Image (cartoon, grey):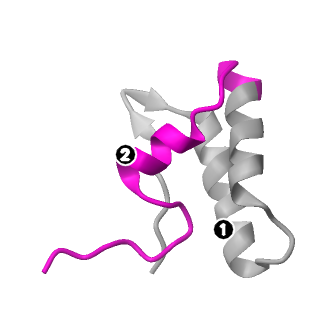
Amino acid sequence: MYLLYAFNWYMTNIETVIDDAYAVGKIINPKKTKMDKKADEIYSYLLERPIHEKMENAFGKIGENPPYPE
């Protein structure tokens, strides 16, 4: 199981859909994708600011195994 960001909150956040798609690509072929750089490129293009670090701090590292409460 891998963590992907939720992309529906009142409306669809297209930038997060694209970010999730790149994360899936990284999971399938980890040598081809530098996720942090690509995510900031996506968010900067669509939102005019890099927010990947904020997303990671709030929700966890995309493409990683999610933490499970004990």
> Is 67 situated above or below 46?
below
The residue to which callout 2 is attached is 58
> Is 40 situated above or below 26?
above
The quadrant in which residue 52 appears is top right
Q: Position of residue 5 (x, y in %)?
A: 47, 52
Foreground residue, 61 or 17? Answer: 61
Helix, strand or loop for disc 2: helix
Q: Quadrant of the N terminus?
A: bottom left
Q: Write down the region rendered in magenta.
A: 45-70
Q: Residue at x 44, y 77 (%)?
A: 65
Q: Position of residue 61 (x, y in %)?
A: 50, 61
What amino acid is labelled 2 in the image?
Answer: Ala
Foreground residue, 21 or 42? Answer: 42
Q: Quadrant of the C terminus?
A: bottom left
The residue to which callout 1 is attached is 24
Q: Residue at x 70, y 18 (%)?
A: 48
Task: Determine the CA span between mark 1 and mark 2.
Answer: 20 Å
Number of the label disc, if any, that sits on residue 37: none
Helix, strand or loop for disc 1: helix
| Left or right: 18, with 64 as reference point | right
